[in-house]
Image (tube, rainbow, N blue to C red):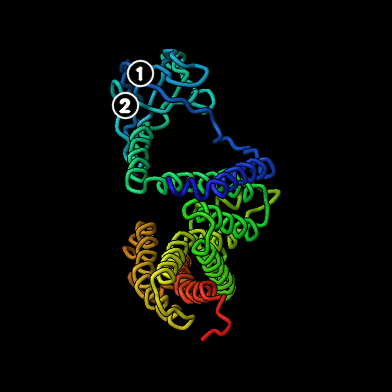
Amino acid sequence: MDFIKRDWKTYLIVIVVSIIVIAIGKDICSYKVNSKYDLDYYSAKVLSIQKVEELHNESNDRKIYFSAKILDGPYKNQIVNAFQKVENTDAYKVRDVKENDKIVIIPAKTTGFAQQGIGDDALWTFSLFKTSNYLLILVIVFLIMIVIIGKWKGINTIIALTITTLLILLVFIPSVLKGFNIYVSTLLCSIYIIISSLLLINGFNKKTLCAIVGNIFGILVSAIIALIMNKVLNINGLINENYIYLSLVNPEHPIDLRAMIWSGIIIGSLGAIMDVAMAIASSMHELNEKMKNKSFKSMFASGMNIGKDSIGTMANTLILAYIGCSMSTVLLLFSYNKNLLYLFNIEAIIIEVLQAVIGSIGILLTVPLTAFFSAWLFNRKIKRIN
């Protein structure tokens, strides 16, 4: 509650400005998707299984016809006939639908699967099982835990997370699809996320200012190194089939794949660098409050000592996070070829190493600058810095 009383103006300004920025950015970056895959999907509940039809082809595929109740949209509460095509050749086996399953369905006529006979009434087709409800429950539990443990700062954290998510989904991603400069968009969004998040969580004070300066410096250093390494390593951006499809999304303004890799490195390292900068700034603030004979030199030395612990843990966290995200790719490549000379020259592996190392370098350089700026700021009234 003290935070609200002390910093309510900052709190209110950040929220209002963020709403305006997201609204204007969304309008400027709005992009209409022209894709045959942009279909209308609806939630539904399976009521009963009507018929299972064996197709008797080489892979013994089958179709399961069932009735379902639509749970949302313009067709809400309507009972419809639908079908699920089960292909046994799929590497990923989807189980058969059962009574009371929550699923996602689409009009069959939009997919080209219009049927004959019983299929004349089967105007809907199974798309996938609906699992988002369980995910939503987990997210809600996570948010409640933040509030319980963090109190008012927990609420501010949730607001900061919301602003970050909306900025990425409603502004940054549409700006990329519309053909805006990815380098500029990434830096602008990253800097805004840094400033808005830290102001919301900690208010406007010297500690926050130190964290913001150190954070922006770390991100800029990471950005420069990533640009240089992209050029030196001749990165072309074709890591996997997803990047190939991405290059075909907007023929009028083709997406720069090299810039997207650079953007992924910057945004991916943003959280870890923010964490380290805030930890150092917070520690320096405590030193300023508790130290009896403080000086620039003593505070800077203490900040560096504190930063050494953060460097070890956060660099390790960052590397493990990237390895975890790319585990399937690494496993696949290692399973087919164990030659290290070959593996560490594959672009997919190179990018993962780049992300982890450049992010860690950003952390390394954030520590001394945050410690230096904090020591200077907390001692700026002293005429002679010693």
Identify the residue under disc 1: 66
Q: Position of residue 235 (x, y in %)?
A: 55, 68
Quadrant in which residue 19 is drawn: top right
Q: Amino acid at mark 1?
A: Phe
Question: Which of the pair 129/363 is nearer the observer?
Answer: 363
- Are the residues flagged by discs 1 and 2 in contact, CB closer than 8 Å? yes
For label 2, the SS is: loop
Question: Which of the pair 341/305 is nearer the observer?
Answer: 305
Q: Is residue 125 above or below residue 236?
A: above
Report the side of 78 relative to 110 (left or right): left
Alpha-carbon neighbours of circle 2 within 10 Å: few (<14), some, or many (≥20)? Answer: many
Numbered tag placed on residue 97 in the rendering: 2
Alpha-carbon neighbours of circle 1 within 10 Å: few (<14), some, or many (≥20)? Answer: many
Q: How many marks?
A: 2
Q: Position of residue 97 (x, y in %)?
A: 31, 26
Q: Is residue 182 above or below residue 33?
A: below
Q: Amino acid at mark 2?
A: Val
Q: Can the viewer see residue 184?
A: yes
Q: Is residue 297 above or below residue 144?
A: below
Q: Residue at x 43, y 62 (%)?
A: 275
Q: Residue at x 59, y 50 (%)?
A: 172
For label 1, the SS is: strand
Whichever of callouts 1 and 2 sits on the residue coming sooner in the sequence is 1
Numbered tag placed on residue 102 in the rendering: none
Question: Which of the pair 383/23 is nearer the observer?
Answer: 383
Q: Position of residue 327 (x, y in %)?
A: 35, 59
Q: Position of residue 372 (x, y in %)?
A: 51, 77
Q: Can the viewer see residue 88?
A: no
